[in-house]
Image (spheres, rainbow, N blue to C red):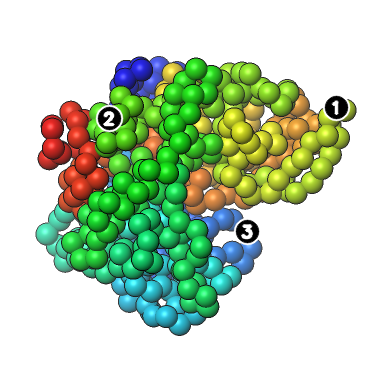
Amino acid sequence: MASPHPNSVCEDDSLTAQALRSLQRNSFDYFVYEVNRANGLVLDKTASDWPASIAAMGMALTAYVVGAERRFMERAEAVERTLTMLRFLAASEQSEAADTTGYKGFYYHFLHMETGRRVWQCELSSIDTALLIAGALVAAQYFDGTDKDETEIRELARFLYERIDWAWMLNGGDTLCHGWLPETGFLPFRWKGYDEALILYLFALGSPTHPIVPACYDAWCSTYEWKEIYGIGFLYAGPLFIHQMSHIWCDLRGIRDRYMRERDSDYFENSRRATLIQQQYAIRNPSGFKHLSERCWGISASDGPGDDVKEVDGIRRVFFDYVARGVPFGPDDGTLAPWAVAASLPFAPEVVAPTLRHLKALHVEVPNPYGFKASFNPVFTGDIDGVGWVSPYHFGINEGPTLLMIENHRTGLIWSLMRRCEPLQAGLRLAAFQGEGQAPGLVGR
């Protein structure tokens, strides 16, 4: 491999344990307060009359595990919150009707916070269901007590996972579809190219009830693009979140599928390289943004100042709303996402920690109940000495990676739990992962 893995399960000298704990705790509180306690649903973002996000719900289930371990909440409360959500998911309507919670074991991307039913005519989401199930399976590993409540958590998590008809989501093809609509059927988009779907494919492979076959994983890998950028070779994806999302639950250090074996790398190392490329992009700063530097970067899918065109310092700048920003090919309107930097901490702490300290000094988190704001853009307002435009919202899928990847960096808690998760381990085996890494029971270990 091109560079050794850093010891990611440790405290970094550039960020004290107290600073990391504070950032974790602030993000954790999102999953305490932005929740319907009656059904466990978690708000997608802090806007009025906004729905729940099933991806945020998966992160909440994982957050309650961290909360119990870190003493952010009592174990009994974590059990109660977990059970409330899992019971709702198990009992909610699954059918072809247009206003249900889900179908074929999958769930709609966005759900009404009170009723739990589909909103916005959104899709039955394959990837967001996988992230939801990841949280359920983490909870099943952590809550291992013999009392009736913790036993029920394990039973419900298994039921929810085994009910999903992963093979149906292939729609007769070799790769998984993005989703399905009751009005028109399957979406025309399939998971192709390196993206956040790694965890989706692993869960689909490992299913004991409705699995896909290994050839489907190979078909997905065949759409990858390996690129060399700034002299660094890596499996390309522009937005930083793609290099983080599956890693929240999957410990991929030192284990490799066929694609990575052929390139003498692994997915953890790949995410490290993607993080370094982000920093190098900011240093080179091809668009001439005055705020970018080696300690000010982080371009990912994020909220933005809105679709607009402005002339700033004699340069015509095009701005965007929520969009999957990426490097080095864009889009890039100068918007940075501090949470995306924090979620890269396990991969490259030596460049992430100084950046987090710089972002903290900019006061992007003040006033703010949940840590860093979702995103900011000094260019939009011309406030180069400050943070400029700041997103008025917090997002569950931003707070989750911040909390959870800091935990993996500090203790490896989520990774260690999922190394005992048989569905995930079965998926890794069927995807032909090998190596001397962290996942037990793999061929070649």
| Residue 34 or residue 275, whichever sits in front | 275
Image quadrant for the C terminus?
top left
Q: Residue at x 45, y 78 (%)?
A: 100
The answer to the question of whether label 2 and label 3 lie on touching residues, with beta carbons closer than 8 A, is no
| Residue 405 or residue 319, whichever sits in front | 319
Classed neighbour count for the residue bearing mark 3: other residues with Cα under 10 Å, few (<14), some (14–19), many (≥20)? few
Q: Secondary structure at mark 2?
A: helix
Q: Which mark is residue 47?
A: 3
- Viewer-nearest of discs 2 and 3: 2
Task: Give the Cα distance between marks 3 and 1.
Answer: 33 Å
Image quadrant of residue 147? Answer: bottom left
Classed neighbour count for the residue bearing mark 2: other residues with Cα under 10 Å, few (<14), some (14–19), many (≥20)? some
Q: Residue at x 49, y 24 (%)?
A: 228
Measuring from the top left, give residue 332's x and y in whole percent.
Answer: 66, 36
Image quadrant of residue 253? Answer: top left
Task: Give the Cα distance between marks 2 and 3.
Answer: 45 Å
Q: Secondary structure at mark 1?
A: loop
Q: Is residue 85 left or right of residue 352?
A: left
Q: Is residue 238 left or right of residue 5?
A: right
Task: Give the Cα distance between marks 1 and 2.
Answer: 48 Å
User: Mark 2 highlights which residue?
Assistant: 261
Classed neighbour count for the residue bearing mark 1: other residues with Cα under 10 Å, few (<14), some (14–19), many (≥20)? few
Q: Amino acid at mark 3?
A: Ala
Measuring from the top left, give residue 356's x and y in whole percent.
Answer: 52, 27
Q: Amino acid at mark 1?
A: Asp
Can residue 120 be seen at all in this image of the molecule?
yes
Who comes first in sequence, dot 1 or dot 2?
2
Q: Amino acid at mark 2?
A: Arg
Q: Which mark is residue 313?
A: 1
Can residue 61 be seen at all in this image of the molecule?
no
